[in-house]
Each structure stands twice: as structure tokens, then as C-alpha cells.
Amino acid sequence: MKLNAERKPIDPLSKFWYKHSDQEESIDIAEQFSHVKVEAKETRIHVSLIDSESGSTSISPIIRNSVKHNVHNDTLFLKLLDKKANYLGLNIAKPLQSLTILNAEGSATFEPQLVENMKLNIGGQSEFSLNMPHRADNDTLLTLIPNLAISVSDKSKLYLSQYYIGKLDVNLQNGLLRYAPNLKVDTMNVQLVGKSALSSTEPGNINQVNVLNVAGKSDFFRRDMIGQDVKINMIQ
């Protein structure tokens, strides 16, 4: 939820969450951290990583007293306490090294400059979708994320769309990754472990993954589900 100096929302998505929140002041985080771990058991949530214009770090929950937080060993731990708390904004001033989401269902939007070289971990039977933040109608250029690593485990599912990623390293451990045709990736490297699979949401259409390198246990890998115009390399 992006607010201006008068704490008013500045884009349509922020206006939506602002309207459905109690509009409490953000919770300032004074401690430094490079990793974030979010646990949202039985809660459907939208997580937003926002570039802090003030240079400070804060949390913007949708409901007052709905999140427990503490910083330990360079990690910010966030635990959702209210099932109705379906929005969590993280205003951060520098890129994260990792973000872990456990026991959650919902979606996330990340500003590209905050996730370069980051590792995204989805676990605990989570089901999450990752989409681009709202952009102006005249903003047609995708910002390149040079490197991003993703791990999906514990029967979790992750859906990707809209981003432009140079090199995407994916580790699936009993996990599922699905991507939309509007996801643009120069090279995707996938390691399959256990009952893992990946596929396009529209395999019959042209997809924008230029090169797909697949290694590991390929029992559940299907070429016909990858999408058109994707070069597939099976790595032994």
C-alpha cells in the first residue's frame, strides 16, 4: 500500500487496500535485516514489497495489532495473528536477500529493484501467485530482474506472471511452478526433486521463456505443458 506524505494512496491497488484497512499508522522497524520470514497459517493474504521513499523500514498491516514481529539473526519474522488480516505491506529501503512464505494462500507483488538476486522460498503447503505491482497505462517497459532464485517445497504451488527475469533458478521439492505467457525469462534453470512439476498456464500458446534447462527427477515433467517457442534442454 503506497501512500504519499499525507498518507493518501497513490495508485489503484493502494486505494483498494486503504479502503479496506483501518488506516493505522505503519509500524516502524529500527533493526537492520536482510531476510524476511512470513507465517500466515490458514490466512489468505496479499504481501507487497514496497520501495521505501523515506529510506526507513516499516510494516503496514491492514488491521491493527494483526501481526507479530521481531528481528533475530538478520531476519525479520512476521506472524499473522488475525485471519481477517489479508494485506501486509513491507516498506523497505534496500533489496532483500531472501523472503520465505509459509502456510499461506494468496498473492504477492514485488517492486523489481527490491528482489534482484533474492531467493523466494514458498513452503508449508502454501499456494501463492506472484504478479507485478500496478503500473501506469503509458508504462509499457518491463524492468529487468537480472537474477532471481525460487524454492517451492512441501506440496506448495507458485504461479508467476508479468515479470521480466534474466536468469531464474528454480528448485522444486515436491512443489509445483506454473507461469503465464506474459512471464518473460531469458534462461530458466529448474531442479526437480520428488513429485515436482512445472507448466505454462497456456501451453498451447507462445510463451516467453527463451531457454528452459531441466535437471533432476523428471517423472512428472511434460514437454507438451511447457508452452510454444520454449527451447528445452534436459540436463543429466
Image (tube, rainbow, N blue to C red):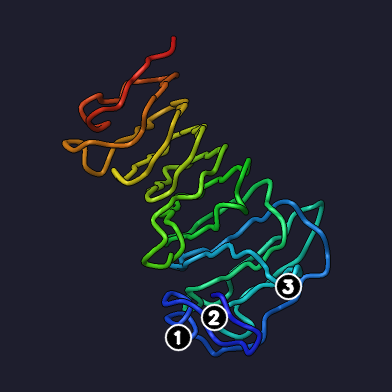
In the image, 7 versus 139, the foreground residue is 139
Q: Secondary structure at mark 1?
A: loop
Which residue in the protein does label 2 denote? 62
Asked which quadrant contains residue 51, the reply is: bottom right
Residue at the outermost top position: 236
- State if disc 2 and disc 1 touch (CB < 8 Å): yes
The residue that mark 3 highlights is 54
Q: Amino acid at mark 3?
A: Ser
Q: Is residue 128 visible?
A: no
**Image-based side of 108 in relation to 70, left or right:** left
Q: Indicate the secondary structure of the residue bearing disc 3.
A: loop
Q: Earlier in the sequence, mark 3 or mark 2?
A: 3
Which residue bears the numbered disc 1? Answer: 20
Counting residues from the N terminus, which is met first, the one under dot 1 or under dot 2?
A: 1
* Element carrying mark 2: loop
Amino acid type assigned to the residue bearing label 2 in the image: Ile
Residue 204 badge: none
Q: Is residue 26 left or right of residue 219?
A: right
Which is more N-terminal, label 3 or label 1?
1
Measuring from the top left, give residue 13's x and y in whole percent. Answer: 43, 74
Q: CA distance from mark 1 to mark 2?
A: 7 Å
Q: Give the label, 1 or 3, closer to the camera.
A: 3
